[in-house]
Amino acid sequence: MKKISFLVLLIFCFFCCWSCSKSSEIVDEIIIEEPDDNDDKDNNNGGNSVVYADIDFSNWKVTLPVDENNNGSPDEYKPDQLINGGYRTLNAVKPFMYDDTSDASIVFYTFPRQSTANSSYSRTELRELIEPSNSRINWSLETGGTMKGKLKMMEISKDNSTTSREYHRTIIMQIHGILSIADKDRLGVSSNNGPPLIKMTWIDGNLWVYKKSLVDETTSGDDLLDVSSSTWKDEKHNMGYVGFEEFEFKITASKGKIELQLNNNTSYIYEDVSLAKWPFENYFKAGNYLGTTAPGAFARLKYYNLKVTH
């Protein structure tokens, strides 16, 4: 009987030792598999990583105020040349559109030099391309769209030609009209240029909207496609003062309606006959479109982010 009791005790001790050993292995295994503290860090902001402006160039081309290839038009660079930081490698682009990594922004610099066929003014400006390689595809107000950006006027030249303004002015956002390819072919015209429906313009720190409206609201049919001031006029509204500080702006377009919002302020809404009759297709623009040809004029504007949705 004593032998049996001793044997039972021996087996019990062996089992206890074995259990302790396995528990230790489990604890060791758990400790080994604990995640590294570094896994919780934000890869964009951790360590010495450089943070860039939040702009995806997949559907933007840029127009510059220079004509380095001497073809008589401002130089342009398409999305496939700009994406994935490609703009940083283009020597022609670097002086006019470049990163400021101190605050994760992109600077748009321009001055009077090369202008487009439909304007006297120069710009460093992005033009929306719904299809990256085809500017013939655009959107209607029925389709609608929203553009939102965070930006800031850095510096701009003084306007010494007038006593009514202290600084020159520049357009920072647009909805630009364009004649559809179907209407262009039907009318047999050579140009598909349309008027800008919305121009957001920085003037002495105030943000003014210029919106196209019909001179005569009874105008109809193909007469609506006349781009001259005899058919379409500008009406304007001051959205508020932004000065040289950061601000956010959003443009939302839909059939017969344009909604504009500065920061978190109450939206300003256009909803009228002119919008209901707007006959053009559209594309968004954003950047620095300087409204002067004065010698020595310039402007530097920066964008922190820019998003478009349809």
Image (cartoon, rainbow, N blue to C red):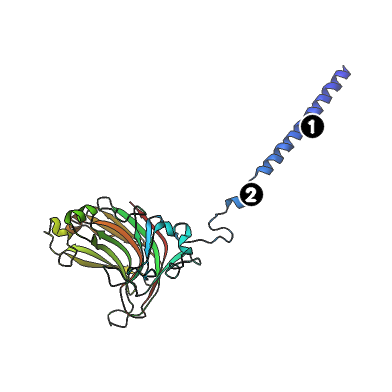
Q: Residue at x 32, y 59 (%)?
A: 284
The quadrant in which residue 136 appears is bottom left
In the image, residue 41 lies at what x, y percent? 57, 54
Crowd around label 2: few <14 · some 14–19 · many ≥20 (10 Å): few
Q: Amino acid at mark 1?
A: Cys
Residue 56 visible from this viewpoint: no
Q: Amino acid at mark 2?
A: Asp
* Residue in the foreground of this view, choosing between 12 and 34: 34
35 relative to 122, above or below: above
Q: Kindly identify which numbered label has been placed on residue 127.
A: none
In the image, residue 282 lies at what x, y percent? 27, 57
In the image, residue 227 lies at what x, y percent? 19, 63
Tell me the quarter of the image containing the N terminus: top right
* Residue in the foreground of this view, choosing between 254 and 34: 254
Q: Check contact, mark 2 vs mark 1: CB within 8 A.
A: no
* Residue in the foreground of this view, choosing between 274 and 69: 69
The residue most toward the left is 218
Residue 121 visible from this viewpoint: yes
Q: Kindly identify which numbered label has been placed on residue 36.
A: 2
Q: Find disc 1 in the rendering and name its residue.
A: 17
Q: Secondary structure at mark 1?
A: helix
